[in-house]
Amino acid sequence: MKKVLLGFALSLLTVMSVLAQSKTITGRVTSAEEPEGVPGASVVVKGTTQGTITDIDGSYSIQVPSEATTLVYSFVGYLTKEMPIGSNSVINVVMDVDVKTLNEVVVVGYGTQERREITGSVTSIDSKAIENLVSPSFESQLAGRAPGVQITTPSGILGAAPIIRIRGVNSISSSASPLIVIDGVPVVSNDRSSVNAANPLANINPADIASFEVLKDGSASAIYGSRAANGVILITTKRGSSGKAKVSYNTSMGFNEEVDRFDLLTGDEWVTIANEKLANAGQDPLAFNDVNTDWQDLIFRKGFTQQHNLSIAGGSDATKYFFSLGYTDQESPVRPNELSRYSFRANIDHSISKAVRIGTSLSYSYTEIFGLNNGANSLSGAIYNATRSLPNVPIYDPENTAFDGYNVTANGATTGFGANLAGPDNNIPNIGFVIDNNLYRSRTHRAIGNAYGEIDIITGLTARSQIGIDLTMNDDFQSLDPRHGDGRSSNGSVFMAYNPAFRWNWQNTLNYQTVIADDHNLNVTAGLEYQFTKFYNFSASGTDISDNFYRLNNIISGSYNNQFSGGGYAERGFDSYFGRFNYSYKGKYLASFTLRNDGISDLAIENQRGTFFGGSVGWRVSDESFFNSELISDFKVRASYAEVGNTEIGTFAAYGGYSPVLGGAGAGIGYSAIANNNLQWETSKKFNVGLDMTIGRVTVAVDYFTNDIDGLILDAPTALSLGVPDNEISQNIGAMTNSGLEFRAYANVINRGKFSWDTDFNITFIKNEVTDLISPLTSTYNRTEVGNPIAQLYGYQWAGVNPANGNPLYVSGDVIVQYNLQPDLPDGTRRSGYKAYDPANPGDVSVTGSAPTQAYLGNTLPKWQGGWSNNFKFGNFDAEIFTRFSGGNYLMNESLRGLLGQGFSNNHASILNRWTESGQVTDIPKLYTGSDQDMWQNSAANSRFVEKGDFVKIQNIVLGYTVPQAALTSAFKGAISNARFFAQVQNPFTFTGYSGLDPESNQYSGQLQFGVDWNVAPIIRTYTLGVNVGF
Amino acid sequence: MGLVALAVAGFTSACDVTELTPATLIPDSEAFTTAARIESAVLGVYESAQRGFYAGAVQRGYPFGAANVEQGDMRGEDMYNDQLFYEITYVGSYSPNSANNNGMWISLYRMINRLNIILDNLDEAIANGVLTSEEGNEYKGEMLFMRALAHHELLVHFARPYSDDPSSMGIPYRTFGIDDVTKVPEGEAVGRTTVGEDYTQLLADLDAAEGFLPEGGAFRANKGAAIALKSRIKLHMGDWAGVLTEYNKLTSKYAVTANPATPFRGGNSSDNIFSFVNSAEANPGVNGALPSMYGNPDLGARGLVKISPLIWRSDFWNAEDTRRSLLTTRDGRGIYTDKYQDATTYTDPNVILRYAEVVLNAAEANARTGKLAEAVTLLNSVRSRALPASVPAYTVAGLGNEDGVLTAIWNERRIEFLAEGRRWPDIHRLSGEGKMAGVPSKVASRSVTNIDFYTTDRALSLNHSIEYSNSRFIWPIPLAELQTNVTAPIEQNPGY
């Protein structure tokens, strides 16, 4: 599919009214809070866009057409009110405070705070926008919903964890993922499976979630102190409210498909190409025309997907409950990948007396993932294999019953040759047989829960104790067929593992709230927290199995000749003493301070403790008497500064010594880490200034932030020849800074009769720079060096194809060299190698040239990103179009480089443009068998394959229809209280100049290796139909 | 309220959640406190030799589990690369970033650091009475032998041959361990000494090892191994008298086996001097183990490397040689070595030093010093055992002159050590001396697709030669080595 990069512009619809005006109405808008008048309130003739705004004293004057019947009064923080016009010419209105919005309560960690009092940077995301979408885990749907929050789904494998970055990359070799807290319990975010990608957040039913709060700046997150370097995502699950039980059932069904496939050669095209590679090297043809096979047909499918959620919520004044059951089954478009989850939740709150409350949040889920081998260069890796398999060879051979009718050589070593004289490179197996017979299964039981008790000791003083647990019981099963594929070499293998993780977390807080002299609001929290986490695992495996029959469900004693076992154990502890002080004067002057002292077991005992503080101030300018704007109804400025840390530095990061090693000569101990007792906390200094403003119907939030990270805990590389374990020592070395600007605007653009349009736009600009390092950090594709953003692409500079002889050209220092592609002369003289390139005499290969040199080829982190949601309502119909965009980054299209390989493998269709005759100008050199390394410089990035990653995606389109109440009442006599049908498509369109399958494809999720699209499964497009029913 | 406070206080004091220690790491301070732990640490050196790091993970048998053989063969012409797996080494397109040369460098120095740390701690263990001085000295001998073995592997891959110019750039020779952050600058200061200095240190280490080591079986370093390795190193140095001295120390202890397959069937024959053990639980794995990579696909192996038609069709390899029959298998696509057979659990030991090599080293040393008759006798002791009585043994007269005898010895090495990784070190030393022009042309990668390339005179497509003067003759130093040494980065080999 060809894609075009389209420009997008935010345009606000303005509708000119040309209606005749025949009557003037005047009046005053007041409220109990503002008896002197509500300024800036909007007065609109219902069903039109015609309106005005009240003056400073709340008075207004409006001309209305003669046929107008109703005026609509609205203002932020108040309930919208409609007044009949009738024959009145003066209409005075008293507006009622909208308790819900005015006192919007935001979860901020160890408590809540009113939205209007917040001085840090906190973005709330309502789950309503995403709860009907289909995805294996909730976080992928948060992408683009909040400024400063970058979430990338790098592949279409169900179970693969999305990459979450809040305000950029904030650590180099420690974790850069945010802390996730569910109902006050920091959850374990380690993937425990050893056979599949099994994202731990996929164990959580998205339908149970009420809201997300993203704590982004230092002040908001400082209460999480040492764990806040990468931001915090607080998740609150749904709870009951008093009243009759509300039962709701939501379901949707549909299918998943791959957004795109690789454009490969047909069998006939490939025969020409393959033989040309050989002929140019002086070798005989090996490929011959037969069939035309697209092996991608084998690995891709339309995957069925369904989800069902049933919940019951309700309660009395004393007891409130929320119960839910959830089931989802999702088939990935890549066979045989599938994820299913069964989940259960019970949230109960009970007031024993006016002063004593208890409650629990309990959830259990069971997640089963069927995975696959999708290693980027694994011979049985689905994408690798299907794109390399020879396209002139049939998939099936019905007579080959020993291999279930697949086309496989008699000895099982590789795919059948068909008409060719050779098999595929590296003897890759028939991927159809592999997918049908090899099993990768992970099952996870996950219990997350907490119980709390709260006592009001005196008025305003509340003590709370909460114990939370997070238990993951993961078991793995992998079984490989002895006949063909990965299991052939060991004559079949079975592997099982049990990988639990258990955490408990105990928090005790005292909270005191009071109002002094009417105007001074105080809210003080003090507390202590303990956390302990245990990770352990053991495994058993067998190879050389006696009969394929026994291998399919579990490891079975006695069914294999060789048996192996393994295991491991690690524990981590954390404790903390903390306090927070919030103060506000008349809601105008706001201040907040937090202080925290934390200890962590990963550091040596003498350096375990760190102290972290944060503070913020805010000023609600719009509450000042001098502030007098008709247009701007709310205006708040805020500033914050905090120092926070990062606890995800690696288990026992400071410790060194000898780990057990098993060699052929026996079990021994091997030096495996250099201790560094001096290792200290890594700290981030986070600064934020922001403003919140409401202008007419538009609410705007702007934030500027910097985050300076110092004393980074770095796996600092050591010279390889020192032989230090892993060639690294954990040290406090390095500094990095992120700075950026966030902007969000949302508005009810139109609210006219049956039609309304809400829009919500956000964009973030981020700049990352590494400011101190011991030495450059280099990986295959990326390099990180002082003065640059982290993980820039680094590699060879392509200079085109020599039109005279088809040799590839590269930059070497400040000259261009060519790699001469020719076999040795009969006397053994080598002719291949780097030769000087003289543009005046390009065919001259007589002068030896130097080897190509490397340079920076582009940054991999997006410089800008954001989202734009538009919601429409027309009568009973609703619709949402959600758009996401990102750019300013580059990525290395390694998939394409591999598909232009010079071996006996299928190729990308663009190889048809190869150089064939003198004078031809092209970007594919002369074909030459086995010359991959010299032609494409495979061991580093190559500018030939570095492309811009800019994109705009239409992320979701949702259409809904709510059945009219009257119809439900007449049809079901009140048995069904509400019903909504919906149709949705996720990932329908991507506009990008990137030539690969998807500009967010990424083989790596770490910080130092990034921006490499390398044989990852294409992301998923989902079509679903569904219904929400309330009883 | 008071109760709650009391409970909190009580629990808090019992709640030392941060005073934890790792369950899987023995601290440095406790590693050399018992004799059993020291034995374990020594086994850890064997483990690092047999299962080192390649591309950041323990895999593929770097450096001495299998990779020394595979890389040594793939740099030469007698084993043929049939797949992309060894393409970079086979065609000579390595760069400072490519994985094989990086893997070899990293895994060898990792092994060296492990053994140097032990060497640094043995004297204290002896002084503290943890070991007797005899036990301690045996361990010293083992570690010094391994140190020489590893550094010599580095020298043949990353440095120009001693036989050309001993004053050319060698490799950093590491004689102390790095187990503390403070030792890093001292380690970084060790630069590329000259090849000559490195060979001097090799011999110093091996002389000491010979003195410390007892006799023993082939699966642990032993006195014979130190002597055999010295014979190899002196051959590289052109110290012909020295080669003979070492040979003479071994003649009464070892013997070439009558059946050429015997050294590969268990690894403890009279010919086996030193081998690294592979086991079902610890081996180079499906992507590295010799039986996996070199074996016949019809026998469950992968067959990524075959015997080259070049040597199979050569006229110097007698058609009736039992090494053609006892040590090879074939399918419709080619001929494979049968030296390594366990393609399921990869337990074949990696044979490092054989007496046959010492014998042929001595044959060459004799020939070089004009003792042609002695040379041919030794040559025949290896060759004729693999031939029926009907095939006459070599004679000095039949071979002509010294050059003829030397050529016959070198050819015999190619046959006898086929698929043992010895071809590259011979190309290295002989090219340096001008006896070879560099890496000869090989059969082009992927071009041998049928058994008739072996059994008929079907034309072979030749490619991938590297003349000795070409910078690609030796491997580049890994880029990361140069970048991460912040105080005294070593020099890259010219041309990279």
Image (cartoon, coloured by chain):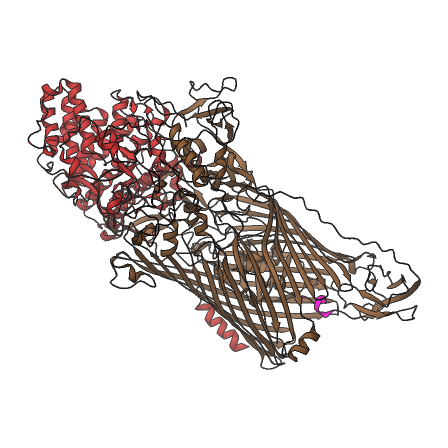
Chain colours: A brown, B red
Closer-to-camera residue (A580/B348):
B348
Task: Give the mark count.
Answer: 0
> Which x, y percent locates residue A545?
26, 57
Place residue A499 in its image quadrant: bottom left
| The N terminus of chain A: image quadrant | top right
Observer-nearest of A693 and A652: A693
Tell which of A983 and B288 is nearer to you.
A983
Q: Is residue A327 above or below residue A197?
A: below
Residue A482 seen from this side:
no
Q: Please provide percent x and percent y for residue A875.
A: 73, 65
Q: Position of residue A368 (x, y in %)?
A: 44, 63
Residue found at the far left of this picture = B389
Q: Is residue A788 above or below residue A82?
A: above
Viewport quadrant of the C terminus of chain A: bottom right
Left or right of A685: which side holds A677?
left
Q: Nearer the viewer, residue A1000 or A308?
A: A308
Magenta span of residues: A98-106
Q: Give the image quarter of residue A494.
A: bottom left
Q: Is residue A278 left or right of residue B440?
A: right
Q: Residue at x 15, y 34 (%)?
A: B356
